[in-house]
Image (cartoon, grey):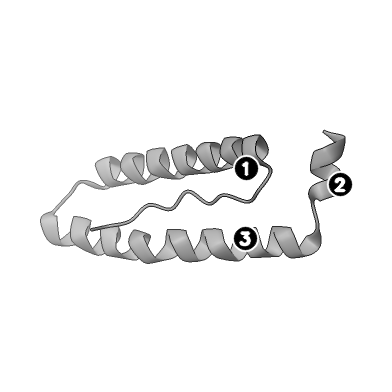
Amino acid sequence: MKTLIRDCSLSAVVAGFIATIISYAGPLVIIFQAAKAGGLPHDVLSSWVWTISIGSGVLGILLSLRYRVPIVIAWSAP
C-alpha cells in the first residue's frame, strides 16, 4: 500500500480522470442514441451501461495495481 501512495501524484490522478471521461463519454452518447432509435427499454439500457461501467472500473483498477501503470479499460460502440 505504501508504494501505491508513493507512486500516486496529482498529475497521475488528473490524467487518469481525463482519460476515463473521454473514453466513457463518447461511446455512451452513441449507445443512448442507438437505444432510443431501436426502442430499447430503459431498464435494459441502464443495466447494460451499469454492468459495463462497473466491469471497466474494476478491471482498470485491478490491472493498474498489478502492473503499476495507469490502465484505462475503454469500451467502444463499433
Q: Looking at the image, which residue is at 20% across and 46% down?
A: 41
Q: CA distance from mark 1 to mark 2?
A: 14 Å
Q: Looking at the image, which residue is at 55% across and 43% down?
A: 60
Residue nearest the viewer, comparing 47 with 28? 28
Mark 1, secondary structure of its residue: helix
Left/right placement of residue 18 relative to residue 55 reads right
Left/right placement of residue 27 relative to residue 8 reads left
Residue that badge 3 annotates: 17
Q: Position of residue 26 (x, y in %)?
A: 38, 66
Residue 3, by quadrant, is top right
Q: Looking at the image, which residue is at 47% across and 43% down?
A: 56
Binning the other alpha carbons within 10 Å of mark 2 as few (below 14), some (14 to 19) or many (20 upward) gives few
Residue 25, by quadrant, is bottom left
The mark nearer the N terminus, 2 or 3, is 2
Q: Position of residue 48 (x, y in %)?
A: 32, 41
Q: Looking at the image, which residue is at 81% across and 57% down?
A: 9
Residue that badge 2 annotates: 6
Q: Looking at the rendered structure, which numbered label has been put on residue 64?
A: 1
Q: CA distance from mark 3 to mark 1?
A: 14 Å
Pair 3/1: label in front: 1
The mark nearer the N terminus, 3 or 1, is 3
* Three-letter code for the amino acid on which mark 3 is drawn: Phe
Left/right placement of residue 18 relative to residue 45 reads right
Binning the other alpha carbons within 10 Å of mark 3 as few (below 14), some (14 to 19) or many (20 upward) gives few
Q: CA distance from mark 2 to mark 3?
A: 19 Å
* Three-letter code for the amino acid on which mark 1 is drawn: Ser
For the residues labelled 3 and 1, say whether their Cβ atoms are less than 8 Å apart: no
Mark 2, secondary structure of its residue: helix
* Three-letter code for the amino acid on which mark 2 is drawn: Arg
Residue nearest the viewer, comparing 41 with 14? 14
